[in-house]
């Protein structure tokens, strides 16, 4: 069975600074997808970034980028130039290819300080 | 609003009562998912539909839980004989088959069982 571990329950960062959220996962599969979702307070989850396991190049979306280390089964999220609107719970998720269900980690609560 | 909608947003019930939640997915999405999120945890997969067919159910979905998607559009999740342990946020998500595996989440229904 696959598992996803987020070892940082809470983090804080100063506005405009950079922060990295960690995520590790355990799987014996070779083909899968990894995601970071953001859940702002009292609002619905939205996708931040996704990574296909077969791609070696790390995904980037504007201020968000990942460091995907397949051999180490690590998938960290870097947020550059943090903004107050980045304050949220961040969930790392795994999806095995050919299935359609996410396996989520327990989340990291990020607070961006003014 | 063309996103995923869920009703009701909040439900308080007494132990032993039945409750039903509704999810309206994004209109062209043919896959629909239900997840449950308890405090301090990431969402856990319950079940998913492709069109009207329920294709996978988690073992978390006891026989007190039933989900339907009668015409391949909206879905309902019913919990019979509610227990205090059923208190959670119930999230619905939808996606497009053949899409990039991104699921779009609704705002959730928060269930409190007294």
Image (cartoon, rainbow, N blue to C red):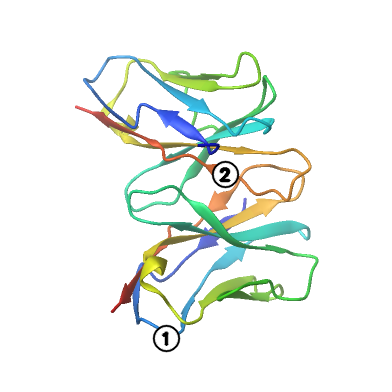
Q: Quadrant of residue B80?
A: top left
> Mark 1 Cα within 10 Å, few/some/many (few <14, many 20+)?
few
B42 left or right of A96? left
* Foreground residue among A35 and A1: A35
Which residue lies under the disc numbered 2? B104
* Identity of the residue furthest to the bottom in this view: A17
Q: Residue at point 64% right, 60% down?
A: A34
Label 2: chain letter: B
Q: Residue at point 55% right, 76% down?
A: A63
Is any part of residue A27 visible from this angle? no
Label 1: chain letter: A
Up the image or down, A72 lies above or below B36; here it is below
* Foreground residue among B108 and A54: B108
Q: Could you tell me which quadrant the C terminus of chain A lies in?
A: bottom left
Q: Residue at point 57% right, 31% down?
A: B25
Q: How far from the left and from the top, in percent, is residue B62? A: 47, 24
In the rendered structure, find residue A17 and report the number of the disc placed on it.
1
Q: What's the distance in space between the residues labelled 1 and 2, CA to CA?
A: 29 Å
Up the image or down, B35 lies above or below A65; here it is above
Q: How far from the left and from the top, in percent, is residue B15? A: 23, 20
Is any part of residue B113 visible from this angle? yes
């Amino acid at each position: 069975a696959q598992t996803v571990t987020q070892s940082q329950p809470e983090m804080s960062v100063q506005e405009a600074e950079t922060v990295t959220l960690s995520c590790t996962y355990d799987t014996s599969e070779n083909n899968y997808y990894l995601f970071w979702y953001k859940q702002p307070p009292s609002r619905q989850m939205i996708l931040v970034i996704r990574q296909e396991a077969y791609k070696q190049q790390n995904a980037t979306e504007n201020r968000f980028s990942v460091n995907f280390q397949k051999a180490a089964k690590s998938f960290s999220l870097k947020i550059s130039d943090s903004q107050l609107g980045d304050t949220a719970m961040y969930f790392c998720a795994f999806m095995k290819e050919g299935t359609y269900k996410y396996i989520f980690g327990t989340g990291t609560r990020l607070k961006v300080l003014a | 609003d063309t996103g995923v909608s869920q009703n009701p947003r909040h439900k308080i019930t007494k132990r032993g009562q039945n409750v039903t939640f509704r999810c309206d997915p994004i209109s062209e999405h043919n896959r629909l998912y239900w997840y449950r999120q308890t405090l301090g945890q990431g969402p856990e997969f319950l079940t998913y539909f492709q069109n009207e067919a329920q294709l996978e159910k988690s073992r978390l979905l006891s026989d007190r839980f039933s989900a339907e998607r009668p015409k391949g559009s909206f879905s309902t999740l019913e919990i019979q004989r509610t227990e205090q342990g059923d208190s959670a946020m119930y999230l619905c998500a939808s996606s497009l088959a053949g899409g990039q595996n991104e699921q779009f989440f609704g705002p959730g229904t928060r269930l409190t069982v007294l």
